[in-house]
Amino acid sequence: MPSGKITDVWKEVRSMRDELNQHGEETLNADKMTFLTLAEKYKEAKVFPAIIKDGHKVAGLKSHKPVETYVKIASEHFGKKLIRSIKPRDIENFRTLRLKTPVEIEIKKKVKELNPKTKRQKYEIIKEKRITERKLSSVNRELATLRRMLNFAVNEGWLIANPFQKTDKVISNASEKARERVLDYDEEIALLNECKDEREHIKPILICALDTAMRPEEIYKLIWSDIDFLNGIIIIRAENTKTETETFLRYVNLTAESVSESAKSFGKFLTNKIADARYKHKTTSGKEYFN
């Protein structure tokens, strides 16, 4: 705010006039916009389930739930702070705070207990809290969403410049721990041997993933017309891929015996409607493989 001197007042007027000429009326109206207001406008414009047209995403997000969480985290931190008052050091402080905040996960464990009256063993479900360090990759995802929100504000004319531009490598993907690891043959066998009883339905998914290197979402969204078990071919449609590249084929290198076993188990998996609504596929095009 100007100090009250005539020269300072005129400087402020010239500054506002220059801003109006360069960035439009919207920047002056957004002078009092808080981060909470920006978050609501961003969610309304960007964060909703993907709209697919002709096999390609034209709006929204394929995985919008994690982004909703990231927006909520940023909103809780910045709250009613004016978006124009957010400085590079505020972003760096946010990063430091998130890295220091541990992750609390509630897990359920099955424990065998002996009933003293019946002398029979039964399973009891107990809940435990597991506390772990927050990963750098998780914080980077949060920061990337914050950066997109501020870029959205710039594009809409509510913010003149994104403060991320003046930060020093606040998002460092190179510092993340590499996650790529390939199972050896013995580990694959051990993993599949654990798929029994309540885990039996996972086995066909793992077989498909190990043989094709498909992503989980690509497997979950398969329908019978995508699969040719006789020739060992899976067709992955563009709307089901992460990068939305054009439709392509992947060849599944399986023996005839493995193809038959995979087809039977995968067919059971699809038709039983287990685990999640994502797996509910109603079709008859694959009957010839299971007779």
Image (cartoon, rainbow, N blue to C red):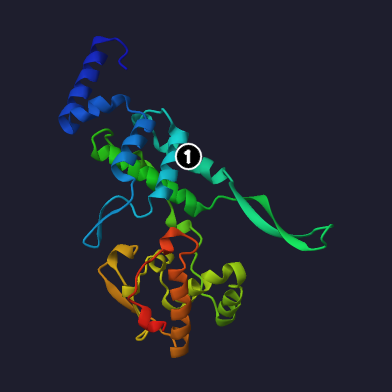
- The picture quadrant where one finds residue 247 is bottom left
In the displayed structure, 287 sits above or below 71; it is: below
Give me the residue at 17% from left, 30% from top. Answer: 24
Residue in front for this viewpoint, 148 or 230: 230
Residue in front for this viewpoint, 197 or 96: 197
Residue in front for this viewpoint, 218 or 280: 280
- Give residue 198's position: percent from left, percent from top: 59, 67
Q: Quadrant of the C terminus?
A: bottom left
Judge from the rendering whether residue 172 lies leftward or rightward of residue 47; answer left or right: right
Q: Residue furthest left?
A: 21
- Give residue 178's position: percent from left, percent from top: 49, 64
User: Can the viewer see residue 132 in this picture?
Assistant: no
**Callout 1: SS:** helix
Q: Residues within 10 Å of mark 1 (few under 14, many from 20)?
A: some
Q: Quadrant of the N terminus?
A: top left
Residue at mark 1: 94
In the displayed structure, 48 sits above or below 277; it is: above
Give me the residue at 31% from left, 53% from top. Answer: 50
Give me the residue at 28% from left, 10% from top. Answer: 5
Task: Name which residue type carries label 1.
Answer: Phe
- Give residue 131's position: percent from left, percent from top: 63, 49
